[in-house]
Amino acid sequence: MRLSRRTLLRSMAAAGAVAALPAVARAQEGDSIWDMFSRNRVLRSTDRNSNTAAANATIETIEPILSVDTAYNLQLAIGQYEPFVAAGGWEQVPKEVFGLTLGNGRRSVVALKRRLMSSGDLPPAERVDEMFDAATDLAVRNFQARHGLIVNGQVDEPTFYAMAVPAEVRLNQLRLNLIRVQNISQTLSDRYLVVNVPAASAEAIENSAVVQRHVAVVGRIDRQTPILHSKVHQINFNPYWHVPKSIIQKDLIKYMNEDPEYLTKFRIHIYDGKGNELAPTDIDWSTNEAVNYMFRQEPGAENSMGHVKINFPNPYDVYMHDTPTKSLFGENARFHSSGCMRINEVDSLVNWLLASNGDWDLGRVQQTFASNERLDVKVKNPTPVHTTYITAWANRQGTVSFRDDVYNFDAEGRTTFDA
């Protein structure tokens, strides 16, 4: 059976484990005065912000996820994981580690430390005590950074789930992704853009080095971002959004039945085949009649594409764009779109894509955003763009990163994709 967060937590619930989990994080009854002093000392002396910065530094290297260097680094990681897995891998984390955080003093902390040592997040030690100390806080944050999770130092649900994935599953990910990276790394140019779907992230690469990294939002499981190779050829500033028929059918009709003012609130206009504008009351929303019309959202703060659309030819009608809902970039699982890719700090990426045009510095990009002016700009030197599916990679520091198999491609053993 494929391991997933849902199946893992369901099995725990069946065993009565979920009800017991929050107790770990509650006040620790029966602690001695010395236990409380020790816990308070740890809380006072630990610089959590510094630990977060140190954890993030382990993954912030210049190697692109798609590169010859990453293929080599993956080979090294496989060489380390194979004997470890053959020897039995890491122990499965007990349910009692759920909720642990800095200052906790419990027997379950010992199991947590052993798990973090076995994956290299915590330095090995001959003796392991029961205190969730500063070193353990850093180790949990290291683990979270490597797995693309919110770095908060707590063994929360996503962290617990990631720790529960067996070492042999991680080794299989490394092997599959080595093949994926090797399949494309030899064909890459000196300058290209990559969106890695499982990581929900984008990288801008020049001369084998990452010059920009961006958090992204990508397609949800039932509306996947396709794997493709193309070239960015046009930037649309403050675009109209023409609502795809699939979204009209799956979403817009439902929204209008829930709130008849939805189209008005979000400045979406309706047009028939001759370009005549219709009123929302002209349509029977209890049927699929709406798919026969064109829906266009005006430029502005409410526009679903935000201030910019990044175009590249593809048969799936997908693109990259800005978004008004920037809170989504702060989530662990950023799989919310209907296939298109929303890019955080997109102004910097647009500036990079228009570098060959010569007259588009960051200030001008930002000013054009703020103006709400409709403007289409041709990219003079079209930039290759690759969407890809990499769930495991390694960098030159020896840090190995993993992501969830969101589209089930690892479980299917897929190493090549139609693009």
Image (tube, grey):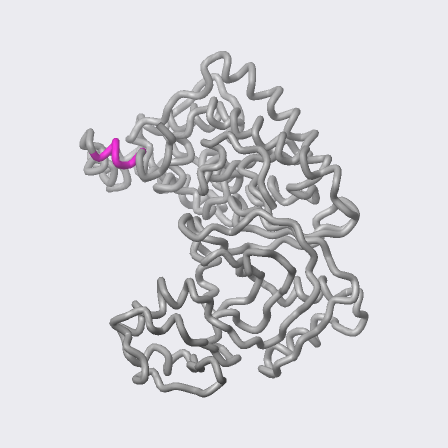
Answer whether residue 159 is magenta in the image: no
Q: Read off the magenta span.
A: 8-13
* For residue 85, above or below residue 333: above
* For residue 204, above or below residue 326: above
Relative side of 301 to 211, left or right: left
How many numbered circles are shown? Answer: 0
**Residue at screen point 61% across, 83% down:** 373
Relative side of 217 to 33, left or right: right
Q: Is residue 306 visible?
A: yes
State the residue in front, 237 or 207.
237
- Displayed quadrant of residue 238: bottom right
Residue farthest front in this picture: 274
**Residue at screen point 39% across, 68% down:** 248
Q: Main secondary structure of the magenta part?
A: helix
Relative side of 192 to 247, left or right: right
- Point out the image quarter for the N terminus: top left
State the residue in front, 39 or 155.
155
Residue farthest top in this picture: 87
